[in-house]
Image (cartoon, helix red, strand yellow):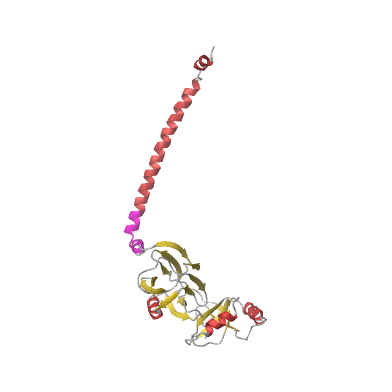
């Protein structure tokens, strides 16, 4: 008997027919199940869309999503942007949303946001924005636009020793949450502010600070004198400014930091320990 004869005379077990039949039925059921799941997913998506459109608050939020530009990143603090020069800064505002637009001296927008850094500090609750490669800023307009927001307490500029950079502080009310979104093509940033309205119990905060002084170049000089320290500048309750290091829970922590700084060779006695409530500005 040849190989072909042996192959053609192989006895097929009776159970194999049943196995093949059941396998075919399972495959058919699986395809049907996939169709049902896919149909259900489409219906769920449609239902979700109809739900969003018909809930006024959600639909209203969707209507405010910007249609110009692509999102680069969303952050609470950090840095980003692209090295630029000669960029201008302008602002516009809608309900609980602040938009910063970037352009060129000769007009028109830029593709990317200039290099920036966003910092968040407490006592009081505030955001610090630093932009590099800036040549023209109408800070009066920035201040005016930011102060239209009910969740913003104050806006003020910090002086830095760089004529192509700007730094300003946005003080927020206690408990206000925020997000910063960077866009490209065209380059812009959005700051969205939210609050659940719940009161935040204030706490005493201990910091190192300088005597209060008018805004000026001393801010930049002081920062250069202590390059290793995270110095920020606060407006005092009298409208002047003080340099601040840290926001500690105890006086002991602040004293230890002061001792550390005072042991530096360049220390000139600029700082002393003070405390104030987290929802207030120092005196």
For the N terminus, give its image quadrant. top right
Where is residue 91? Give x, y as percent: 38, 73
Q: Is residue 158 magenta?
A: no
Q: Is residue 98 visible?
A: no
Q: Nearer the viewer, residue 204 or 248?
A: 248
Magenta span: predominant SS is helix
Q: Which residues are magenta?
A: 49-63
Where is residue 246? Give x, y as percent: 58, 77
Quadrant position of residue 26 = top left
Kindly identify the residue that appears in the image at 38 percent across and 40 percent down: 35
Q: Is residue 103 left or right of residue 14?
A: left
Kindly identify the residue that appears in the image at 51 percent across and 72 percent down: 120
Q: Is residue 14 visible?
A: yes
Quadrant position of residue 66 = bottom left
Q: Can you say whether 165 is above or below 21 in the image?
A: below
Q: How many marks?
A: 0
Kindly identify the residue that appears in the image at 36 percent across and 47 percent down: 42
Kindly identify the residue that appears in the image at 49 percent across and 23 percent down: 16
Q: Is residue 208 left or right of residue 190?
A: right
Where is residue 238? Give x, y as percent: 48, 87
Q: Nearer the viewer, residue 2 or 210?
A: 2
Outermost residue toward the front in this view:
106
Where is residue 53? Give x, y as percent: 32, 58
Q: Is residue 60 magenta?
A: yes
């Amino acid at each position: 008997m040849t190989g072909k004869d042996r192959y053609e005379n192989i006895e097929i077990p009776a159970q194999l027919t049943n196995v093949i039949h059941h396998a075919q039925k399972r495959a058919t059921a699986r395809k049907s199940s996939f169709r049902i799941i896919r149909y259900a997913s489409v219906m769920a998506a449609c239902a979700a869309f109809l739900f969003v459109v018909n809930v006024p608050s959600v639909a209203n939020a969707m209507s405010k999503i910007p249609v110009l530009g692509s999102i680069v990143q969303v952050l609470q603090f950090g840095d980003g942007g692209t090295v630029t020069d000669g960029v201008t800064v302008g602002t516009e505002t809608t309900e609980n949303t602040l938009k910063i637009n970037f352009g060129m001296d000769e007009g028109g927008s830029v593709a990317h946001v200039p290099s920036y850094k966003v910092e968040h500090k407490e006592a009081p609750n505030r955001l610090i924005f630093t932009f590099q490669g800036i040549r023209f800023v109408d800070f009066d307009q920035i201040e005016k636009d930011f102060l239209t927001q009910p969740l913003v307490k104050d806006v003020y500029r910090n002086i830095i020793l760089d004529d192509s950079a700007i730094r300003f502080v946005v003080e927020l009310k206690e408990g206000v949450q925020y997000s910063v979104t960077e866009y490209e093509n065209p380059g812009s940033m959005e700051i969205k502010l939210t609050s659940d309205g719940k009161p935040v119990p204030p706490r005493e905060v201990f910091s190192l600070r300088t005597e209060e002084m008018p805004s000026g170049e001393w801010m930049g000089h002081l920062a250069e004198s202590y390059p290793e320290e995270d110095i920020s500048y606060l407006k005092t309750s009298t409208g002047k400014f003080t340099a601040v290091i840290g926001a500690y829970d105890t006086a002991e922590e602040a004293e230890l930091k002061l001792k550390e700084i005072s042991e530096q060779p360049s220390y000139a006695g600029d700082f002393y320990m003070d405390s104030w409530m987290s929802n207030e500005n120092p005196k």
